[in-house]
Structures are given as C-alpha cells and as structure tokens.
Amino acid sequence: MIKIEFSTTEFQFSHSRLPKGRGSWAFESALWAGPKFYPSSTYAEARKAVVADVRKLAPNESATVVVNVCP
C-alpha cells in the first residue's frame, strides 16, 4: 500500500502557523504537474481529497509519496 506524507514546511514558513481551517488549499506532488487546488474546503477535507487522488494515480505502489502543502 502506498504511504502518503504531507509536508507543511513551506506553508509554515510563509504563514508562521500550521495549516488548518477553511479556505482554498493547494498541494504539489511529483505525481502531477503543477499544484492541485481545492477551493472552499477545510484542510481536513482537502487532505482527504488529495489522499483519494494519490491512490487513484498510484494504486499498487509500495512507495512513499510526499505531498507539499503550498503557501
């Protein structure tokens, strides 16, 4: 099963806090070109959508995928 890690380093550097709450969220990964946007959702909802997207793109991989939370 694929392991998904979320990196919040860039977001924390930009906003001086952890990502949380409602807003427009963007995530980057090596699995897709450019950032993926999730407008008008909570951070938790956006993370769930990203996990579903990653599992669709790499369903049988046994690797670790790093997903960056964009600032």
Image: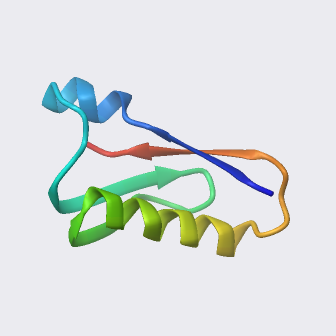
Q: Residue at x 32, y 45 (%)?
A: 70
* Quarter of the figure that contains the N terminus: bottom right
In-image side of 5 versus 19 (left or right)? right
Figure quadrant of residue 64: top right
Residue 66 position (above or below residue 23): above
In-image side of 16 versus 26 (left or right)? left
Figure quadrant of residue 19: top left
The x and y percentages for residue 62 are: 84, 51
Q: Residue at x 16, y 54 (%)?
A: 21
The x and y percentages for residue 71 are: 24, 42
Q: Residue at x 45, y 66 (%)?
A: 48
Q: Residue at x 77, y 70 (%)?
A: 59
Colouring used for the render: rainbow
Q: Is residue 56 visible?
A: yes
Q: Nearer the viewer, residue 37 or 48?
A: 48
Q: Nearer the viewer, residue 4 or 66?
A: 4
The x and y percentages for residue 36 are: 40, 65
Figure quadrant of residue 2: bottom right
Residue 19 position (above or below residue 46): above
Q: Is residue 36 visible?
A: no
In-image side of 8 versus 62 (left or right)? left
The x and y percentages for residue 17 are: 18, 29
- What count of labels does the image hold? 0
